[in-house]
Image (cartoon, rainbow, N blue to C red):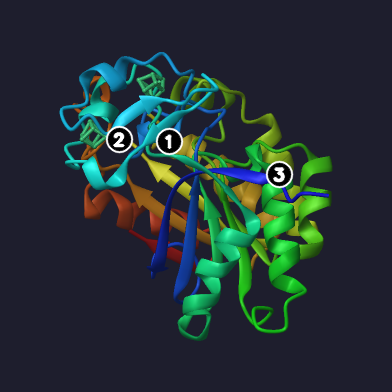
Amino acid sequence: MSKPLGLVNRILPFSAVDGPGNRFVIFLQGCNFNCVNCHNPQTIGVCDVCGICVEECPGEALQIKASGTEIEWNKSRCLRCDNCIKVCPSDSNPHSQWLDVDFVLEKIRRSASFLSGVTVSGGEATQQPEFLRELFHSIKTDSALNHLSTMIDTNGSAEISIWKSLLPFTDGAMVDLKAFDNQIHQKLTGNSNSQVLQSIQHLQKAERLFEVRLLIIPDLNDHDLMLQQTANWLCQLSNNIRIKLIGFRNHGVRPEYSDFLEATPERLDEIRELFQGFGIQEIKVI
Ligand code: SF4
Ligand code: SF4
């Protein structure tokens, strides 16, 4: 049986910020959330082959494949101007490619001796569970690769059945919680937080919750009352829970969100102290 393909936005052979240690990172294309803070909005959509970028490409590097179902990108003609990304009405990227697991494994193999692990990010990694499962299963059953930890960077929206199918081959997940209040979460992501909270609980019970990432956007999701409720809920899951406080930065976000306030270091320090007051000690602020 052929191995599943993954729609890959890009691959980063080395990263120090996508999980513990030195990591090989695969960014998958397509996300089921539409977050106001997204710094890679071109990873949200999946191409519908509208052809607009083909017309607007100054390097004539793009064409619609004969099948009519995909865009073909000629890297050698590409001017790296990103015009295709700017004109895409679907928040997609014609440079994304369907890659098979063996191709990605071969790339990992080349740098395996310098790596601590592999992280799959997005987009939303769990939107392509078959690819993710096959990739992580292949890593864990390969004697030259099984020293690598396998981590998922996720918005937490996957159903528990998806987590159950992934966790036998997954060492940890880093989960975003954009807001504990559901209405605010809806406003920031376009989706309910109910499944996100269930995912965090499930991952914690399964001892696969590496960290919860809390984005802080002044005046939108940094009200003390909600942060106290968040801290209370998290510390009841575990006092050893690891938290990352991420101050909103407007660099790279879509123009309509670029005037949102950025979190100051002083405000992030106050929030760190608030969480410490609930007994949570492992808090990283970035
Ligand atoms: S970045 Fe996009 S628009 Fe620019 S030359 Fe390359 S394919 Fe064409
Ligand atoms: S990448 Fe965007 S603009 Fe280009 S064909 Fe796909 S949907 Fe259309």
Q: Element under label 1? A: helix
Disc 2 residue type (three-letter):
Pro
Callouts 3 and 1 close, C-beta under 8 Å: no
Residue drawn 66% across the image and 83% down it: 144
Q: Nearer the viewer, residue 237 or 102?
A: 102
Of the numbered discs 2 and 1, the one sitting upstream in the chain is: 1
Of the numbered discs 3 and 2, the one sitting upstream in the chain is: 3
Disc 3 residue type (three-letter):
Pro
Q: Which residue is mark 2?
A: 218
Residue 198 rendering spot, x and y as whole percentages: 74, 40
Q: Element under label 2? A: loop
Residue 197 rendering spot, x and y as whole percentages: 68, 40
Residue 207 in view here: no
Q: Locate residue 274: give its quadrant.
A: bottom left
Q: Which residue is mark 1?
A: 43
Direction from residue 227 to residue 152 in the image, left or right: right
Classify 10 Å Cα crowding around label 1: few (below 14), some (14-19), many (20 and above).
many
Q: Please name which of the two marks, 3 or 2, marks the residue nearer to the observer.
A: 3
Classify 10 Å Cα crowding around label 3: few (below 14), some (14-19), many (20 and above).
some
Q: Please name which of the two marks, 2 or 1, marks the residue nearer to the observer.
A: 1
Q: Which residue is mark 3?
A: 129
Q: Locate residue 88: give its quadrant.
A: top left
Q: Where does ligand 2 appear, by image quarter?
A: top left
Of the numbered discs 3 and 1, the one sitting upstream in the chain is: 1
Classify 10 Å Cα crowding around label 2: few (below 14), some (14-19), many (20 and above).
some
